[in-house]
Image (tube, rainbow, N blue to C red):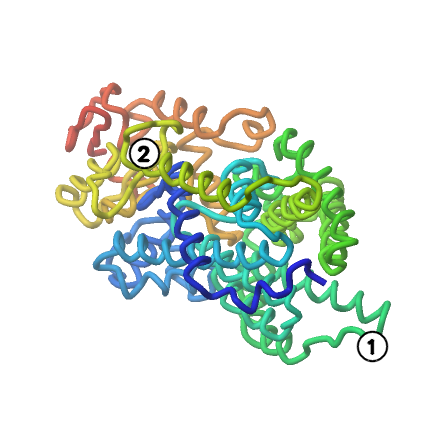
Amino acid sequence: MPLHPESTGRFWNGTNLGLALLLHIILTAFLGYRFGDQDMTETLSYALYLRDISLYPKDLYIQAVGTSWLNERLPFTLILYPFTNNLEWACFIIHLVSSLLFLLGLIRIARRYLATELWVVLFTLTSILLLYHINLGGNEAWYNYFVPSQAAKCIAIWSIVYFLEQKYDRAFLVLIPATLMQPVVGIQLVLLFTCVLGWSKFINPARENIPWKGLAVYMLTAGLWLATVFIHHLITDSSVTSRQFYDIMESRLAHHFFPSYYPITSWVLLIPLFILAATIWRKIEYRLHVLFAFSLVGMAMYVFLIEVLELSYFLSVQWFKITVWLKPLSILAVFAWSEKRVKIPRIKLVTALAISALLFVSLAELGGWVNLVKGKPYFFPFTNYYTDEMTIALEARERLDPEACLLIPPTVTGMRFFSKRSLFIDYKSNIHSKEYMAESYRRRQALYGMDLDLRKAGKNMVFVGNDYYHNLSAEEFQMFRSDGATHVMVSAGKKLNLTLILQTSVFAIYEL
């Protein structure tokens, strides 16, 4: 049983909503807010294409997702589709709402096991802010931009809420939209919940009932969609062999899918933390103890299947993404144990002072009066946030023909969306299709010099690829015309014996 079961009955009130809003302000102040670049290049541009299929006629990624409705990006992109005339504001508002939904879910879980407000605040900030970037697989529970993973997790956290509250059918139903947003997030929790309930039923048949209705509805909706997409892209697609696909995935997505590439610091910090938490939960919440046990066994199996047997089909499991939940739940276990032993005097006054200080520092950070965290993005729709690459992309939209196809450096991520022009290849965009991954690998190798040997050498793929790209001559760039490229974008300092179309102080675009 939870330590504080009465917390759920009085949850929906101004205090919790206000706390979630406060935490969002703190997260935004120190982690920032993005729009238009990085991973958003995939779905924002896809949304524009769904509205106007004449866009991006030579773009490898857009044509890959646009030729079939059976792709994992579609359900999320349909959320953006109605707002293509004003995606800046739409993403900002939806990201705000999704963040509050996520934080409220985290607060609701925390209040089951923590009695005091200060401990709840410290737990939340420790989980999301202080230990940000400490992860196994490059995944976090919250992101500072609106992408499929953000949408999926802000929904999926409520499945954990309902699971802990023994509302099992509701827990599975909530995972339907989460799976549609990002398949791995949803299916991993379905597997874990089923294992935990099955184990409970095995050791005590009279204690638990399997929520067959919720599980059946899930399998007939999100489960059916997921199976269809998986079969279409990875089973029936024979464009490359399993061995080739394994090598391609390692060269591009090793930081997500291959445990041997995860940071040693994260291994040292998180695995002992998970084991400690599993031990603590055994006395506080046995279902979480079992969930941790199955998760850790799954990690060992995943490492064996991927790193020892090198079975490419199991890459889709991406089991270490489950750590986005294990990390906060582990911290919660430690805090629940500590709260009983560490007494904070005059708790209401201490809490009020601590929260006020956090709010003051966060507002000062947002206002630019202090700059404790360098380089964070503040790409708010009500500000002039355009970076150098966004600025030249907007100019390219006006100057380049809609049929244009650009070669761009691997460091550039905002060009596709802001220019509405095709890209020959970029570093960020991926869809888990064998055919796409194979062709994108070929193009990245030719244009950026990126291959499996470079990855195994431990080099920074983007930095090395950027140097390789900028060492190409005009004649070498022109060789890509046979594959449809029409223009090349380089740093302003690199001069090419080609017709100059656009130039800023940072970038230049030449016609091939």
Along the line of sight, the residue nearer the viewer: 400 or 49: 49
- Residue placed furthest toward the front: 346
Q: Which mark is residue 364?
A: 2
Q: Which mark is residue 206?
A: 1
> What type is the residue that disc 2 sits on?
Ala
Residue 398: x percent and y percent? Answer: 13, 44
Per the image, label 1 sits on a secondary structure element best described as loop
Q: Residue at x 80, y 74 (%)?
A: 207
Badge 2: how crowded within 10 Å, few (<14), some, or many (20+)? some
* Whether residue 139 can be seen here: no
- Residue placed furthest toward the right: 203
Q: Is residue 335 above or below residue 505?
A: below
Residue 442: x percent and y percent? Answer: 47, 39
Residue 49: x percent and y percent? Answer: 29, 58
Q: Is residue 142 left or right of residue 402?
A: right
Badge 1: how crowded within 10 Å, few (<14), some, or many (20+)? few
Along the line of sight, the residue nearer the viewer: 55 or 303: 303
Q: Is residue 191 left or right of residue 94?
A: right
Per the image, label 2 sits on a secondary structure element best described as helix
Q: Residue at x 54, y 61 (%)?
A: 156
Kindly report the distance in space between the C-alpha atoms of the residues bearing marks 1 and 2.
Answer: 56 Å
1 and 2 marks in contact (CB < 8 Å): no
Q: Along the polypeptide, which appears first: circle 1 or circle 2?
A: 1
Q: Is residue 222 above or below residue 316?
A: below
> What type is the residue that disc 1 sits on?
Ala
Residue 52: x percent and y percent? Answer: 24, 62
